[in-house]
Amino acid sequence: MGNRDLEYLRAKARRVREGIIRALGVNQRGHLGGSMSSADLVTALYFYKMRHWPDNPQHPDRDRLIFSKGHSVLAQYAALAECGYFPFEDLPTTKQLGSFLQGHPEKDRTPGIEACTGSLGQGLSIGLGMALAARLDRRDYKVYVILGDAELAEGQIWEAVTAAAFYETDNLIALVDHNKMQATGKIAVLYDVGNVAEKFAAFGWRVLEINGHDMEAIVDALDEADRYAGKPVAIIAHTIKGKGVSFAEGVAGFHNGALTPEQYEQALREIAEGGV
Amino acid sequence: MAKQACPRTTYGQYLVKLAEKDQRIVALDADLSGSTMSCLLRERFPQRHFEMGIAEQNMVAVAAGLSFCGKIPFVHSFSMFLTGRAFEQVRQSVALANANVKLVGSSYGFSDFGDGATHQALEDVALMRALPNMTVLVPVDPEEVEEAVELALEIQGPVYIRISRSPMEYLAKEAPGASLLEPALMADGGDITVFANGLMTKTALEAKELLAQEGISLRVVNVSCVKPLATEHIQRFAADVRGVITIEEHSVIGGLGSAVLEALALAPKPTSLIGVEDQFGQSAQSHEELLQHYGLTAAAICERARLLMGKGAK
């Protein structure tokens, strides 16, 4: 897509956040916090960086995005809808019985969803498989994987990090949504995953570290990642859980919480006013 | 002596043969390629064989990613690690996505006799059978190993193939199924039907010989495809006999025996399940020694058959 107009991208990010709230609805629990912290990353990928065709979701040369932190898929649903993969008006059907928008992403149910994730730790491996396939087929698509920071406790992540370094998959880019929270509270208190950037670097990855809500920094980092050959790239994005909705920012209860009708309206109002 | 072959070698050679024709085939292994014999594909097509280190969970999910881009990955390890260690990756990354991934579990049951309980998969069929979208194949002889690989390639979706470490005889069939998906009549008889698979089918044929001398006639049916189970065939083979015996190199919980009972639930027959009785394996100095110890023998089939015929223990 490649529109580097930052105001345009910020407007799209507001639209993605609105979509998250509309998918969440009222009085139904949903993963607001992690969806909001990923929203700017997702926006930059779908509306700036990724080569993709909403009217042809299976195009073999498309760039792929996998939400390994599958619970935050509301952000991806909202972005896919805003891109035109399906109507934005369908977002409120999320999690209804029979809906094509499941609580966690399911390949083949939803246009634009590339894998099944939700049980944490598996998405980077799937992305690595796609990156290896691209090499075998001499195709130049890229594979982006969004990881949660708390998800880095899963051992399989480090199996995949090791394997990607060994296979030198420079077409694989991991984005760590580093919001410093796990479901039940602060990572630093409950289960510290340590210095994420140093860990990826120690495993042989190129590492970039940015503010994950600074649109200019995000697009710069995504462009920078293209310039590295021979190594996979990790973009460590420092974020705020619940970003964009004042009463949810940094609040563990909104990891998987429900909005009252008043909170729903307030969230939409704050997003429209565009504090982000 | 009857003609026999090492099924792992047969497998590895046949995979290479298919890979010559089908560019989509790739292989992954977790440092066991010399045992699973995926090493043969590595020698022929080094670019299409991925050594994934001793990291089965990553390997299985990487295979899913390869399949989503049009590859047909054959994923190798010992049955235990592939279906056990990576169970949830098989469930979410592969089965839920209906990924076109072929899981080839080697050295199942007691065939890795020396290594003991940690390496002896006696619950892999139960695990794989419980997953939607999964096909479960247990070849009876080297020829069926080739058929299983061929069938796996035809099926759009995940397949689990169980391959023994021990040599297998080529077995003749009285009436093969249309494909491995259908049970095969190995030898007909009128009193009791024995459903078996893998090496246990030959054991059932031995029991048939022994019981013939006592006037008990066994029908031996080989069930290489445990899932989806050809229910109507199972019912037909069991309809006109007095009882049913199942035998498998697996726990009696959740494997072929359970599947047969499910198939016969609406037209039940007195049924006796032979398998490993809710225990772990252990080390021994031969495969045969363990089969004897855990009662996976022709003598065990004979004893159960006599009971079903009301003739008591001899």
Image: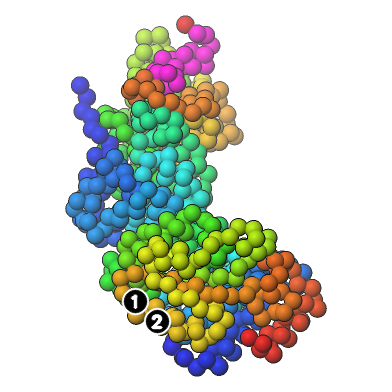
Percent x, y of residue B266: 59, 34
> Label 1: how many residues lie within 10 Å, few (<14), some (14-19) or many (20+)?
few
Residue A128 x %, y %: 39, 64
Q: Is residue A56 above or below residue A189?
A: below
Q: How many discs appear?
A: 2
The tag on residue A173 is none
Q: Chain of mark 1?
A: A
Q: CA distance from mark 1 to mark 2?
A: 7 Å
Q: Residue at x 51, y 70 (%)?
A: A176
Name the residue that disc number 2 marks.
Answer: A224
**Residue situated in front as seen by the camera: A276 or A138:** A276
Q: Quadrant of the N terminus of chain B?
A: top left
Amino acid type for the residue under numbered disc 1: Tyr
For residue A157: magenta? no
Residue B211 x %, y %: 39, 13
Residue labelled with disc 1: A228
Q: Chain of mark 2?
A: A
| Residue at 23% across, 29% down | B4
Q: Report the magenta residues as a range.
A: B292-313
Q: Nearer the viewer, residue B233 or B123?
A: B123
* Vertical side of A228 occupied by B273: above or below: above
**Above or below A19: residue B19:** above
Kindly indicate the quadrant of the structure image that contains residue A74: bottom right
| Identity, as a three-letter code, of the amino acid under mark 2 | Glu
| Residue appearing at x 64%, y 72% in the figure | A241
Closer-to-camera residue (B78/B201) = B78
Q: In this orientation, does residue A131 appear?
A: no
Q: Callout 1: helix, strand or loop?
A: loop
Residue in the image at 27% along x and 55% along y: B49
* Residues at marks 1 and 2 touching, judged by CB atoms closer than 8 Å: yes
Q: Are marks 1 and 2 on the same chain?
A: yes
Relative horizontal placement of residue B208, taking residue A94 as reference (left or right): left
